Amino acid sequence: MEKLVPRANQAAFHRLKLTKKQLLTKNTFAFEFEVPQELKPNFRFDAGQYVTLRYASKGQVVQNDFSMTSAPHEENIALGIKIGSDESSTKDLYYDVETGDYVEVSEPQGRFTLISKPHEFRTILGFAGGIGITPLISHFKHILHQEPRTRLFLFYGNRKSEEIAFKQDLDALVDKYGDRLQIYYFFSREEAGDHLFQGRLDEKKLHLIINQILHLDDTDEESTIWDAVDEVLICGKGEMIKSLANACYNNGIPKKNIHFELFQEYNEDIYPVEKQFPVIENIAVEFQLFNNTYVTQLPNNRTKLLQQLLIQDFPVPYSCKSGICGSCVCTLEEGEVELLDNEYLTEKEEKSGQILACMSVVLSDKIKVNFDVI
């Protein structure tokens, strides 16, 4: 079934030719699409973004988002894709589509991006789990190409060494940029020579990384590498993101410098909610979605807006419920909400009235929002 997307969030699709298909591990593969000259402007992108593929699976049309591994200076659109199970639509995608075939590909989307600073000395860390490596490859290739003064550290977790996706690409980056790039592999179901590299990437592992890898800084004898960290990129499952993001924050990295991308649905807040709100009961709600107007009532504001609408079985779009993906962005037309931490909206967008339903606590007895206009 095709994924429902509000009109305001819809991206344009174009048919692109598949020029490369490669099985990377037992359950991951790479696709590469050629972008014709006339569509180059439509497919300009920033490192860390994704595209949506529209394709047939088991007699239905499906849409799925996939992060790009290509960097902006490269010609084609390259993706890394995981086959989740034998019933996964991505398995059909791999076996049904051959090089030379055309696939519907959306124009680039997403905000898991960084501002390029080619004239600054920066230290950037990346944490990836499994197929979460894909947008980090895009970021790292772009930064190494654009920022000659930036050094990068990548911490990449998998269950076993045989499951490392894009190992050859990562090795090639180290060979070319070994003076500025260090990569460390961690395994949760395979013994490693050093106990440091055995186990999941989480808060406890981060403390070991800080003390055993990011300690002495050759560029500044009075501080550590961790003290010099400017940005942190995290991509993987929700529990990994939550653990690492909070550990980074609790060890001194500001939230605005911690960026994350979620690869599976996740229903919890990434950071703890620290504010207390007055309880409001019997809240009247009106909202527009898919060109329809809905009216309902919320019993109170103890639960955020999106979650309450989903409980009432309204078809509100979402992917993360954690303020990361932007699927539930809408415009507040009447009433008041408190927008909690989010990784998506800019300050300018917030001032224009945009909110994320998944991160909004209602603070008035009546509210009106529009998912079709942002």
Image: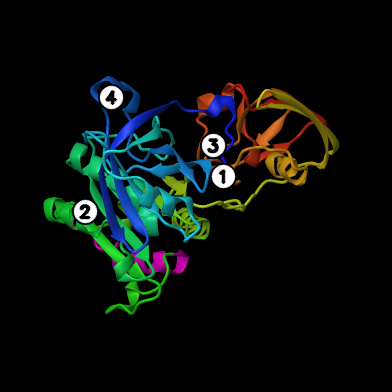
Left or right? Give the position of 336 relative to 111.
right
The label on residue 326 is 3
- Crowding at mark 4 (Cα within 10 Å: few <14, some 14-19, many 20+): few
Whether residue 345 is situated above or below residue 304 in the rendered picture: above
Q: Residue at x 48, y 60 (%)?
A: 240
Q: Which residue is mark 4?
A: 40
Please state if 3 lies on the left or on the right of 227 as rendered.
right
Name which quarter of the figure residue 355 lies in: top right
Residue 350 horizontal/vertical position (percent): 57, 27
The reply to whether dot 2 and dot 4 touch (C-beta < 8 Å) is no
Mark found first going from the N terminus, 2 or 3: 2
Q: Label 1 near label 4: C-beta < 8 Å?
A: no
Residue 358 is left or right of residue 349, and the answer is right
Q: In the rendered structure, which disc, 2 or 1, sits on the residue that comes first in sequence?
A: 2
Mark 2 vs mark 4: which is more N-terminal?
4
Label 2: which residue?
169
Mark 3 element type: loop
The kind of residue on which mark 4 rests is Lys
In the image, the segment drawn in magenta is 202-221
Colour scheme of this structure image?
rainbow
Q: Is residue 40 above or below residue 339?
A: above
Q: Residue 48, position in %: x, y? A: 36, 41
From the image, tell me which residue sits under label 1: 319
Is label 1 in a helix, a strand or a loop?
Answer: loop
Q: Nearer the viewer, mark 4 or mark 1?
A: 4
Give the foreground label among 2 and 4. Answer: 4
Give residue 175's position: percent from left, percent from top: 12, 55
Of the two numbered discs 1 and 3 in the rendering, the one whose residue sits closer to the viewer: 1
